[in-house]
Amino acid sequence: GGEGNDHLYGGTGSDILIGGEGNDRLYGGEGKDFFDGGEGIDTVFFDENFAITADLSQHRATYTNDAGVEVIETLLNVETVVGNALDDLLIGDAANNTLWGKQGNDTLIGGAGNDRLFGGAGVDFFDGGEGSDSVYFIYEKFAITADLNQGRATYTNDAGVEVVETLLNVESLVGTAFDDLLIGNAVTNGLSGGEGNDTLIGGEGDDFLYGGAGVDFFDGGEGNDTADFINEEFAITADLNAETVTYTDAVGNTIVETISNIEQLRGTNFDDLLIGNAENNTLFGDPGEDILDGGSGIDTANFYYLPAGITANLSQGTATSVNQIGELQVDTLMNIERLTGSKFDDQLIGNVNDNTLHGVDGDDFLIGGAGADTFGFLSPNQGIDTIADFNSIQADLIQISASGFGGGLTGGTLDADQFTIGSAAINESDRIIYNDATGAFFFDSDGTGALGQIQFAQLSTGLALTNTDIFVV
């Protein structure tokens, strides 16, 4: 192949297929073939009339031909494997693999990456391995019940027989076009019902439940759970107090879905109304002119998924941005105490209350306003944010993430010996450096400057900062 996304067909001989650049598709056919996907995300299709064992970690595929001879094929730089209609064994490697068994009673083992495993007709065995792995049932012809607690998926086939499949080390599930029941476990799960009237139960963990066509039921269970409606085709009203999501479909019918034990809401690409409850909710503002009403509690408006920077002003109760086609859109903010910006350069402005502002990526401009405000940083590598009005007397805080920053930071108020004022670290214990002459705010992971200090914020000059102004989470 060349630079593009190529399709290479080998035929019946012992072929050599080299994809080159691009996301290539390699079809070997019969014979002893050699596959090298090259760069990109490359797929090998096995159309042989024999069950295949394909092991990406061993760079080979084997099958036994009609003469009883084991045929060994080579797999290099391959990320995706598609089996045939027989009972295949497909094994991934340390990369993010996609394994599709198609028909037959297949065994799919993901390996160490974040893998996608696709079942089909037959009784399949899924083992995601390490990483955050997903099983897709989109090609099944029957509604399924998939329970990650029990480690199995069941459905009733055309003959009325219950089919039981195995699910091991799986974190996310994608259902069929029918009425599915998807149940999570104690870790963070992603459950997507697809089409049909689906029931999604998150269980423990901080789960993500995705709506789709049909009248769905969402129960997040324990943890901090998100109901995500970004793929819906109509504007929604989601009300955590009423535990309902309503929308009007294409023929004018009012559809009512149930949402229970949900703490976070993400709407559609249209003009949504998202309403929180007495909990501390997060409401995601997506394309469309949304109304985000946090209700009681300490609530967050999150704009991380927007395609451009945001100007969010809690004093004015508005968030202004530009959508994908360059149109100005204005969201309405009500009962919001915290703001999280986009991946771009944002302006986040608080009000008279105690606000928390997270600029996230980009070079952001942050104004806390009156009140004891918190300015949050997840990593020192997300741009340089300007804090225009940091005020220790008002009990403002700079909050940094121990896991995101590293350098041996531990939770709580920053240790006194980890903070210094000047242009650089003085000793190996220093981690946070405030240059009171320029206002620059730095992180030094080892206190020696050997790895280079990183500026992640810009404050006013001449502030009387101490370690007590910095809190580690």
Image (spheres, rainbow, N blue to C red):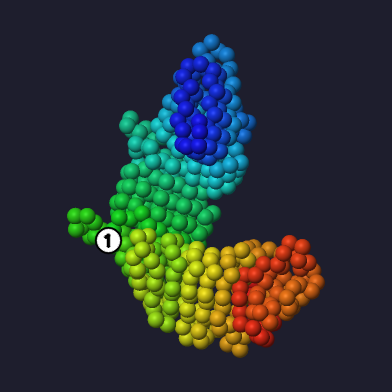
Circle 1 residue: 247
Task: State whether residue 366 appears in this view.
Answer: yes
Q: In x, y percent, where is residue 22?
A: 50, 38
Of 30 and 257, the residue lying toward us? 30
Q: Residue furthest right?
A: 427
The quadrant where residue 209 appears: bottom left
Residue beneath the point at 58% across and 17% down: 70
**Percent coordinates x, y for residue 398 in the rendering:** 61, 76
Q: Is residue 358 above or below residue 70?
A: below
Instruction: Tally the numbered discs.
Output: 1
Residue drawn at (61%, 41%) of the image? 94
What residue appears at the point 39 percent right and 35 percent down from the top-left corner?
A: 162
Q: Is the residue 322 above or below the residue 212 in the image?
A: below
Tell me if 284 is positioned left or right of 399 in this view. Answer: left
Quarter of the image where one finds residue 227: bottom left
Q: Quick one: which residue is furthest to the left in this view? A: 251
Residue at the location (41% across, 34% down)?
120
Q: Neighbour class for label 1 at 10 Å: few (<14), some, many (≥20)?
A: some
Q: Nearer the viewer, residue 205 or 328?
A: 328
Residue 310 lies left or right of residue 69; in this view the side is left
Q: In the displayed structure, would residue 212 be above or below residue 115? A: below
Dot 1 amino acid type: Tyr
Q: Quadrant of the C terminus?
A: bottom right
Q: Residue furthest front?
A: 2
Image spot of residue 13 (x, y percent): 51, 16
Classify mark 1: helix, strand or loop: strand
Can the viewer see residue 169 in this picture? no
Residue 274 location in percent, x, y?
A: 36, 68
Q: Is residue 411 left or right of residue 447?
A: left
